[in-house]
Image: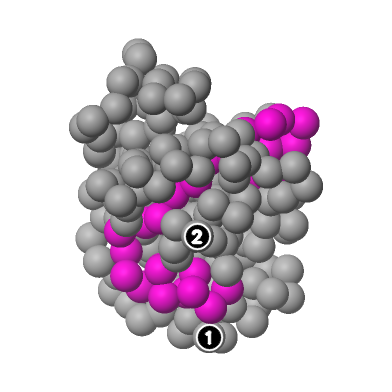
């Protein structure tokens, strides 16, 4: 560690939520990889921090299915609920039609879909219960290896506050599986990850 390096501040969920509401980003643990998070209307902050083009959508994480369904178009609610019952919290991201005028316009500018997930990390779900759903992405610069620990994320983003207490639970290091809704009963797998859901027709 270089001389004079100051680690990122580590804050309790209530204090970190205040920073998020003030427009700041945060580094959070998840069951897969550490993530960067902001309130949905601050999504541009994540693309700037990652040095990543805004044509790569962000993921909306929430504490409950109802929180996420509020941002999802009604026709696919039933199927999202069915998959959520079996696989959330967990490493499954569902990309579904977004509600008009909702968070999708920030996380996927110009697009019509929204990726949603409830992480299997109790600590982050507690934050999400306070903050509401957050726009998220992995805690690394675009094109660079993913941060695997809070310390690694702090080296990349030294000015971004982190969720405490630490140390965090060990993440799997494996990205979530991503399913895209095609039509009733049919999903397309665009990334095979930690969870392979049963009971649905999945196209690859």
Q: Position of residue 139 (x, y in %)?
A: 48, 52
Q: Nearer the viewer, mark 2 or mark 1?
A: 2
Residue at point 32%, 20% (across, down): 202
Question: Is residue 34 a member of the stretch shown in magenta?
Answer: no
Find disc 2 in the rendering and name its residue: 66
Q: Secondary structure at mark 1?
A: helix
Residue at point 65%, 77% (across, down): 19
| Residue 83 visible in the picture | yes
Q: Tell me the quarter of the picture where residue 59 sits.
A: top right
Find disc 1 in the rendering and name its residue: 14
Of residues 45 and 135, the one drawn nearer to the viewer in this rendering: 135
Q: Position of residue 11 (x, y in %)?
A: 49, 82
Relative height, residue 166 to residue 55 (above, below): below
Relative height, residue 58 to residue 31 (above, below): above
Task: Give the quadrant of the C terminus.
Answer: top left
Relative height, residue 71 to residue 121 (above, below): above
List the single residue furthest toward the top: 204
| Residue 157 visible in the picture | no
What is the total number of numbered labels drawn onto the structure image?
A: 2
Residue at point 45%, 42% (across, down): 78
Task: Give the quadrant of the N terminus.
Answer: bottom left
Q: Secondary structure at mark 2?
A: helix
Question: Is residue 122 a member of the stretch shown in magenta?
Answer: yes
Q: What residue span does the magenta drawing correspond to?
A: 104-131
Residue at point 71%, 30% (across, down): 111
Q: CA distance from mark 2 to mark 1?
A: 22 Å
Q: Position of residue 72 (x, y in %)?
A: 59, 45
Q: Position of residue 89 (x, y in %)?
A: 32, 56
Q: Are marks 2 and 1 in contact (CB under 8 Å)?
A: no
Q: Which of the labelled discs sits on residue 109, or is there none?
A: none
Of residues 2 and 130, the one drawn nearer to the viewer in this rendering: 130
């Amino acid at each position: 560690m270089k001389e004079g390096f100051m680690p990122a501040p580590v804050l309790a969920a209530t204090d970190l939520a205040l920073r998020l509401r003030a427009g700041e980003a945060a580094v959070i643990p998840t069951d897969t990889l550490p993530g960067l998070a902001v309130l949905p209307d601050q999504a541009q902050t994540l693309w700037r921090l990652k040095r990543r083009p805004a044509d790569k959508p962000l993921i909306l994480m929430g504490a409950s299915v109802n929180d996420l369904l509020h941002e999802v178009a009604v026709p696919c609610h039933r199927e999202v609920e069915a998959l959520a019952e079996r696989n959330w919290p967990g490493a499954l991201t569902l990309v579904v039609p977004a509600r008009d005028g909702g968070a999708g316009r920030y996380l996927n500018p110009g697009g019509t879909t929204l990726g949603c997930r409830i992480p299997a990390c109790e600590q982050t779900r507690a934050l999400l219960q306070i903050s509401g759903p957050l726009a998220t992405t992995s805690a690394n610069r675009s094109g660079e290896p993913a941060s695997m620990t809070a310390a690694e994320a702090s080296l990349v983003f030294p000015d971004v506050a982190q969720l405490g207490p630490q140390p965090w639970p060990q993440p799997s290091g494996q990205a979530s599986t991503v399913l895209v809704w095609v039509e009733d009963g049919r999903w397309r797998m665009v990334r095979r990850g930690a969870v392979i859901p049963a009971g649905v027709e999945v196209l690859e």
